[in-house]
Amino acid sequence: MTKKFFLGLLLAMGMLTAAHAAGGGAPLDKFPTERVTSLPALQNGARLFVNYCLNCHSAEYMRYNRMLDIGLTEEQIKNNLLFAGKKVGDTMAITMNPVQAKDWFGAAPPDLTVVARSRAGNGGSGADYLYTYMRTFYRDDSTLTGWNNLVFPNAAMPHVLWELQGQQRAVFATEKDPHDPSKTHHVFKNFEPLSAGTMTPTQYNEAMADLVAFMQWMGEPHEGQRVRLGVFVLLFLSVFTVIAWRLNAAYWKDIK
């Protein structure tokens, strides 16, 4: 039993280490979770997703008509979110050939339907990861795309939203390892703006919060209903427990 316990502990530690390494090493900013329950935020996030993400990334497990659940009408979906002869009942797939995509980007862009649920690391959720990732692109002439990312170093994806955010560069400092003075590390200090975008920093952060909110909702559209149902069930069980306890006491009160 002791051997199995230690083996399980080692396995869990290994999984946690792998999850931490997958995050890229940068601390994650907290995603404003209240956006997931805001219909205007979800609708703006859907607009951003279709216009900027759906060109290369698919969301094949989501249909356009599911956006009726976030307050859009079929007419609004048709007029604003459908392109290339798509229908409201179609899945959010793309026509890009995976082989060509791999040649162009070095790797085929992944499907984003459940990316907010699958990405996590550095003590943050998948939404925290995406929210930080979309805001930490910086110019790097040493990469093929001319861009790099603080959360996902050497990412194949270029910064497709740079016109909104503007361009920035990352400032790193070389510091000695406190445990081994013979070693040094490059430590991120801050970003310096190179050119302004069409949005202010505050507006861009809010736009990315809306985009991530939509991706979070897309990964589990029924999450809100599930949480509300869970609260109702817990309340019911609490009341039923009190009733059962008093009934049990009344039933056994005359029995010694």
Image (cartoon, grey):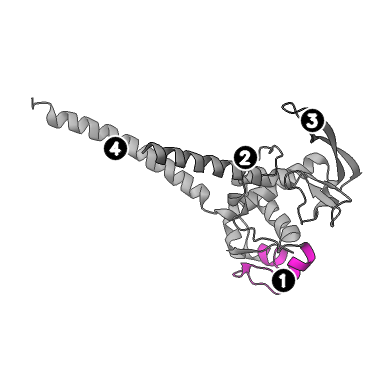
* Amino acid type, callout 4: Phe
Q: Which residues are magenta?
A: 76-105
Residue 250 visible here: yes
* Amino acid type, callout 1: Val
* Amino acid type, callout 2: Gly
Q: Residue furthest bottom?
A: 85
- List the residue tagged with mark 2: 124
Q: Residues within 10 Å of mark 3 (few under 14, many from 20)?
A: few
Q: Residue furthest right?
A: 195
Q: Nearer the viewer, residue 177 or 53?
A: 177
Q: Which residue corresponds to the image point at 77% horizontal and 68% vertical from the top-left?
A: 103
The label shown at residue 240 is 4
Q: Is residue 51 magenta?
A: no
- List the residue tagged with mark 1: 99
Considering only order in the chain, which callout, 3 or 1, is on the residue closer to the N terminus? Answer: 1
| SS at badge 1 | helix
Residue 96 visible here: no
Marks 2 and 3 in Cβ contact (< 8 Å)? no
Considering only order in the chain, which callout, 3 or 2, is on the residue closer to the N terminus? Answer: 2
Considering only order in the chain, which callout, 4 or 3, is on the residue closer to the N terminus? Answer: 3
